[in-house]
Image (tube, rainbow, N blue to C red):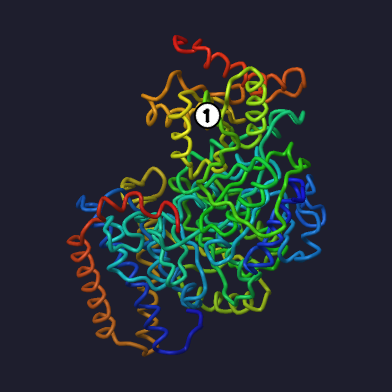
Amino acid sequence: MREITLSQAVNEALAEEMRRDPTTFIMGEDVAEAGTPFKVLSGLVEEFGTERVIDTPIAEPGFMGMAVGAAMTGARPIVDLMFGDFIFLIMDQLCNQAAKTHYMSGGKLTVPLVLRTNLGATRRSAAQHSQSLQALVAHIPGLKVALPSSAYEAKGLMKTAIRDNNPVVIFEDKLMYQDKAPVPEEEYLIPFGEANVKRTGSDITLIGTSSMVQVAEKAAEILAAEGISAEVIDPRTIVPLDEATLIESVKKTSRAIVIDEGHQSFGVTSEIASRLNEKAFYHLDAPVLRMGAMDVPVPFSPALEDLTVPTPESVAAAARKLCGGEMIHAA
Amino acid sequence: MAEAKHNTEDYLRMYRQMVRIRTFEDNANQLYLSAKMPGLTHMYSGEEAVAVGICEALTDDDRITSTHRGHGHCVAKGAEFKEMFCELLGKEEGYCRGKGGSMHIADQSHGNLGANAIVGGSMGIATGSALRAKLLGSNDVTVCFFGDGATAQGLLYEVMNMAALWNLPVIYACENNGYSEYTKTEEIAAGSITARAEAFGIEAYQVDGQDVLAVNALTERLVDRARKGEGPFFIELMTYRYHGHHVGDINREYYRSKDEEKDWKENRDPIIRFRAHLVSEGIATEEEIDAINAEIEKDASDAVAYALDAPYPDPSEVDMHVYAD
């Protein structure tokens, strides 16, 4: 199978859906001729024109609000938010307007829009261009949240997001844009709420999201060399969350670590760990561990920044402790 | 009064719609005061000529976005009393199945995209609706209602910039009722409100919001031009809110005098003025107008009685409509 970059995969998904559905359009900062700073959208304006690939002023609340209105009245906007950190600028339009309109109208109005943005530290971009804010939006009912972990997921989830009748936030890992993965030539979609078991194992379940899927897979390789069999699962969407697959795995392995690049406190890892505790408690041989980013603003200095996110080594070390029984009396 | 529509039927419909709004609000206020309505609400009384003058220039395909003070826009855009009162009382047959209430009432069958409880919260939505119209080649126009208080929100300037850059068919209708909640507009708004729109190259007008014909004539002209791609436009409508910021805002003398309220109600009331015009022009007799008023009052009290007796939503609805299929 051919291999393409995550960036190309997103680009293909957008182009295919824009060809299929004339009500779709892209809006955001420097999305047209510039193709975004990450060059993910390069070439789209040449095919679809500036009418459907719209460069906006630097006014995130404004263009996010406009996307909500366009979506409510029959279009399917795809909003490009240059950095995930800018979500704080659009919170009212995303969380008070887009997320609640369907419910508040008793199901009469729908808001089919996609907000594509990114996450991920270790790019030396400091505290306002490095956050992973998926927990923030996953907290709000009415929003769906997808976290692609490779080019394959990025394409399949994007196509599903564009066809979904709800506001969907997709976080791409900005460090992964140039990473290649096998992506079929023929069309495919990845349904929301279906986790992907990336690797089967029997001793421990490593649940990783987005950038942390690779970390979990590398940790599993380290552990395999030591005779520990780790199962790796990528939920792919956290709203909706495929609880059944996660619980089934934990019932089998009896141990789990949840790894996500958002801050650990009150985060995605906490939520998933709680659900496993509530629904697989009697199957657990050890507490479910959370491994998120440190609860500090992302520092600029490489010497500090690299300390803030989970690594294959830190995940493997934690897994070793869990499997060795060291965590049972940790409390 | 300014001249706009010339057809007797149009004149009477505008009168009727203004009275329907006033009557709706009087009933809503009573429901609140008698503790039959959950929550609170914001009365539109006094501002009827604004909603009616504008909405009478629109078709059902044209969209509006409304505000927390939104009952007037909802009625003017064609909504029915029964579904509106049901919504205010949280009943299943309400426009939003009781999930929105007064501050989120929407009626998309008549193009009302909904009230909004965030001041200025719908400016993006209205402008986006206009962007959609342009992109998909629809001929509809969107009117964005908001108050003078909302002109302090930055979102307005972001979206007016884009609307002007892209010639979007949107009309920004600023209902200047003199007060931003409990504070005089002059204390929260520096300079001229219309000049802010003009800074973006948007044609801006100020109009007497108590003169339904003046509002209607101006809006008809601007809607027509917006359909031809000459938008956006901005209208500042000078009006007055008879009640407090919300129904519980009873003692208002610390921010405005009773004399001021009396002056607006007695000398500038949009319904009294239009009624006098209808009679003096021979469009309707006093008796005919009294009959219209009585009929509307009966409609309202019937709708209130219906809504009070109507069932609440089934508990199973609580987690319905979080996501669309």
- At label 1, the amino acid type is Thr
Placement of A182 over or under B134, stated as above or below: above
Can residue A253 be seen in the rendering of this structure?
yes
Mark 1, secondary structure of its residue: helix
Residue A19 appears left or right of A274: right
Pointer 1 chain: A
Placement of A116 over or under A261, stated as above or below: below
**Nearest to the observer: residue B15 or residue B228:** B228
Assign the C terminus of chain A to one quadrant of the image: top left
User: Would you name the residue on which mark 1 appears?
Assistant: A269
Residue lying at 47% horizontally and 70% vertically, measured from the top left: B111
Query: Where residue A273 appears, x then y in whole percent?
Result: 47, 28
Query: Where residue A92 appears, x then y in whole percent?
Result: 53, 46
**Nearest to the observer: residue B70 or residue B194:** B70
Query: Where residue B234 appears, x then y in whole percent?
Result: 61, 65
**Nearest to the observer: residue A270 or residue A128:** A270
Placement of A236 over or under A311, stated as above or below: below
Residue lying at 56% horizontally and 35% vertically, measured from the top left: A233
Query: Which residue is most to the front?
Result: A227
Residue lying at 57% horizontally and 19% vertically, measured from the top left: A319
**Nearest to the observer: residue A226 or residue A316:** A226
Residue B314 appears left or right of B103: left
Number of marks present in the image shown: 1
Placement of A258 over or under B145, stated as above or below: above
Residue lying at 48% horizontally and 60% vertically, measured from the top left: A110
Can residue B233 be seen in the rendering of this structure?
no
Residue B187: image quadrant is top right
For the residue carrying disc 1, how many other residues have a C-alpha within 10 Å: few (<14), some (14-19), or many (20+)?
A: many
Residue A216: image quadrant is top right
Query: Where residue A183 appears, x then y in whole percent?
Result: 71, 50
